[in-house]
Every structure is written in C-alpha cells, then in structure tokens.
Image: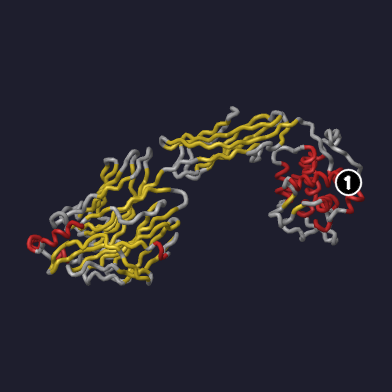
Amino acid sequence: MKNGYLIRVSLTTMLMLLFFGISATNVLADGTETLGDPSISLSPGSGVVVAGTGMETQPGTININVPGTVKQVLLYWSGGGDNKTIGDNIVTVNGTPVTGTLIGGPAFFYTYNINYYFSSYRKDITGLNLVSQGLNSLKIEDMDFGGDENNGAGILVIYDNGVDNAEISLKDGIDLAFIDFPEPRKSTVLQTLNFTPDTVSRTANLAMFFGSISSNGRPNSIEVVTGGIKTVYSDLLASVDGPQWDSLNLPVNIPPGETNLTVQAFSRDDTSGTDLPASLTWTAASLSILMTNPAITIKKYTNGSDADTAPGPYLTTGNPVIWTYIVTNIGNVDLDNVIVTDDKGVTVICPKTILAVGESMTCNASGTAVAGQYENIGTANGTNGSKTVTATDPSHYYGKAKTLVTRTPGYWQTHYVEADREWAKVVAAGNALQCGAPENFIVNNTPGLEGGFWSSISYETNKHKRTSVDQARMQLAFQLLAAILNNQAFGSDPGGTVLNDARTNFCGTNRNAMLASKSLLDTFNNGGSNKLFPTGYINGKADPKTSQSVAAKVYWNQPTLPGIP
C-alpha cells in the first residue's frame, strides 16, 4: 500500500470509499485472501531460513546465510496494481528471468480513484543453483505491478546440516489486513501449523514474509499460540528488508506434548492504542521444528588397546588391567542420567551424568588379568525425556603366565633360517613393520629384515653420519624387529600397548619416545632367552655370515626411506 495513502485520506473519506467503492466483483475477489497449503512438495531438511528485499527501488538485493547444504530454494514476490493488472509473474534473479506461479490474488484491497488488487507469486529456483551453503547475495529486478506497489521479494531456503532432521510445514498465498476495513480485509486468517509431539521442550523457527508495511513505523501485531500460551509480538514489521517488505525468522518455544502452533497477523496498535496501524499483506508462513534424535556411542579400550575382537593384547596374569570407556553424545539433544556399566561386574567410574550435544567423557575401571581368553562388554545408557538410548562395545585380552619365551635380537640377527621363516608369517598376517601406506617404507622381506639387524647405528652405507633421531630409530629397529619375531614365533607379548607404541614411535620423529620404546623392548626380548623353546619349534644353527650377506643395508640409508620423516 502506498506509504502515504492511509495517512493523507481522512477516516470519513475512507469509510465512504469502503461503502461506495466496492463492487460485487471486489467482494468475490476477497475469497482469495488467505494462506493455504502449497501446491508443491517440500524437501526434507534440518531447518528453514528466510531473507528478503523491498522492491520500490530496483534492483533489490537479498543477502541470506544458509547454515547447511541447500535442499530447496523458493522465491516469493508480491505487490498491488489497478484492476486491469493481476500483477507481474516474471522477475529477474541474478540476470535470469523466472516465471512464477500465482498463489494468491488478485485480491481487492482498497479503492483510491480506482480499485487496487494485490497478488503474490512463488517459484522454485533450486535448479538455478544460485544459493549454496554460507553467505549468498541475489539481485532481484524487473518487477512491475502496474506502477503502484512493488512490495518486495523473499527467499525461503530449506537446508540440511547433516545432523538434524526437522518437520517442515508451509502455508502461502496472500492475506490482506487493515484495521479500518471490514472483514475479511480487517484481519488475517488464523493459520495452524501441525507437528509431531515430543516429550521435551523444543525451539522452532517460524519464518514469514509480509508486504505493504509502511516504512515510517506504523503499529502492527503478530500473535503466536502453542501449548495454550499466547505470545504477542508487537511492531516487528517495519520494512526491515526495505520499503514495503519484511522477512522474519522468529524462534518459538514448543512445550512438551504440543501438536500445533497457530499464528495470526493484525493491523493493530498494541502500545498507545491511538496510532494508525499499518496495512499488511501476508505471503508465507513456515514452521521448522527439530525432531529430537538422542543417540550415544561408547568405545572401550583394554590397557589402551581397542580390542574389539579376540584375542586382544596378551597380558601377564596377576598384573593390573585398566579399561577405558569413551562415551559421546552423538544426538541433537542433551542426555541426562548417563551411566556406564560392564557385563563382568567391574565398577565403572565416570566424571559426570549429563552430556551436552557433541560432548564426550572418559570413564575408567580396573581389574587384575586372569588366565586365558577374556571378554567384557561396556554399555552406555542415557535419557532425554522419556527416550532412552543405549550403546555397547566389547573388549578382549588374553591372560598368559608370567614366563615368556623370547629370543634375543642377537639370536634373530644370526639365525637366518628361523628369522626368514617367522618373518614370512608376519608379512602374510599383514603385520610387517611399516610406515605410511604400502607404497611407502615397509620391511616385507628377509633382506630388509636382516638389513635392520646388521646396519650401523651411527652411519649409513655411504659413511654419512646419521642424525641423533635416526640413530635412535636404528636402535629401536634392532629391538622392534626382534620383538615382532618373538611375538610371531612364541606368542610372547610385552603387554599393554608397548609393541604398538613402538611401531608408532619408529615412524615418528620423537627421539626420546624411540629410546623409551627401545628400552622396554630390550627388557622384553631378553626376558625369556634362557627358557626352552616351545614344543615343535626347530632351533637351527647360528649362521651370521649368511645372515649378513643377505642384509640389505642400503635399504636403511637416510633419506632414501620414503615414509620415515
């Protein structure tokens, strides 16, 4: 509506226009004055966001920030003209003409010399790929409603954040209101937006488009009712997007158990009661409400090993066992009453019982290693309202007697036949010493193995002195290769994560970590060297000459080992 029209026309004149300027055709046209269910399908998503621009001055610019992947983009526009013009169904968006569908009107609003009718249009412009995740800017132009009111244009975007699912409802069309006109032009039609109830309180986004709002601050009102609670929003419409156009993203609290929300807009003065309220045209109302999706995960470790399958780490019977449980809230709502239990009855201690969305905590339990194969299962439970979520994760270890059978690195260095036989089993099991992807450094044959035993700690084959880090790496390699062979040949294990940590440190750059692993493995490799070989194990003669002859020492030169820093 023209900004000055209802200001400069006296109340008496307006009443005369109301009673004498309305034809039978006008009255029939009033039947289009309501929002309704859209004639198009809506994409699923996580939410809705809207933005718009006034179009009295063109081009107009819509700036909209989309917090997720774009699923659907709807363009709305509206305005008013004389009775010979139903509106303008074509506008240009970023240089591309788009033709909209008439969704409301032409609806008679007022008579001022001639009759004025208002119309609104909608176009799904998703396929134009003009809107993406993040900040977007769209230029709107070439709108012409007969030279009277080019109210504005708005973009409604359904997005997916990859985490949440929302129920999305939409009403669109056109609904006209001015307080001094008779019904149905006096007020808008109450709209009801339905959704599935939940047991917890939620926040919904009520997104709407309005036109014809005066830019000089005239009063207006929006009533929202849900759960029996009415909330009145006064004077939110003030041509915020530019003259004659407003878009709203209104957060609304939804109480537990509620199934619908009603919304209605009014040309009304809620404050002084004496100011002339604004006229308005209501084009669209959308409600997006998150569906609560509580979820939880648990990851259990035994002495630091993620041992989902048997046998898990080999532990010395009688030694301590530490179980670690990492619990994470992977849902979209907070979790209460979070507890962790273990099926073997061990006591699990957690630092808290409430987890916010995305939050993790570490719980612990302890015990003593027993002989044989052992499995226990950790279970995490949490609640949100009346919903309970559960997750489980198993862990294993194998308890062995304290007596280990191992051979010293010197044994494996000089017993070529035994080293060759056992290392072939290591490679076949996919456990060869390796840094990075298979195409990078890997000890997957006997020459590489023996090269690790026979290469100089201090110098490369070209007489270049190794760095202090590489010298530590070579010391660790001597013990690590032997430890891997002892584990393969005899099932002996240094316990905990010692062997895996040594593999990691070998491929790293931390000299102190390398030397620490080397010391632990030195103790392990020499721990059972005086014990008898297991039954069936053939102990051949030492053959250092042949062993050294097949050693690929040059393979251990730096910097020719890709994958090792």
On screen, residue 406 above or below 182: above
Q: Name the residue that disc number 1 marks.
A: 414
Is residue 156 visible from the viewing direction of this image?
A: yes
Is residue 565 visible from the viewing direction of this image?
A: no
Q: Which residue is found at the position 17% from the left and 67% from the top?
A: 83
Q: Position of residue 264 (x, y in %)?
A: 24, 51
Q: How many marks overall?
A: 1
Q: Position of residue 292 (x, y in %)?
A: 41, 43
In terms of image quadrants, where is residue 259? top left
Q: Which residue is found at the position 39% from the left and 48% from the top?
A: 166
Are there few (<14), some (14-19), or many (20+) residues within 10 Å of tag 1? many
Element class at badge 1: helix
Q: Residue 91 vs residue 435: left or right?
A: left
Q: Residue 534 vs residue 345: left or right?
A: right
Q: Which residue is found at the position 76% from the left and 30% from the top?
A: 401
Q: Nearer the viewer, residue 66 or 126?
A: 126
Q: Position of residue 179 (x, y in %)?
A: 16, 56
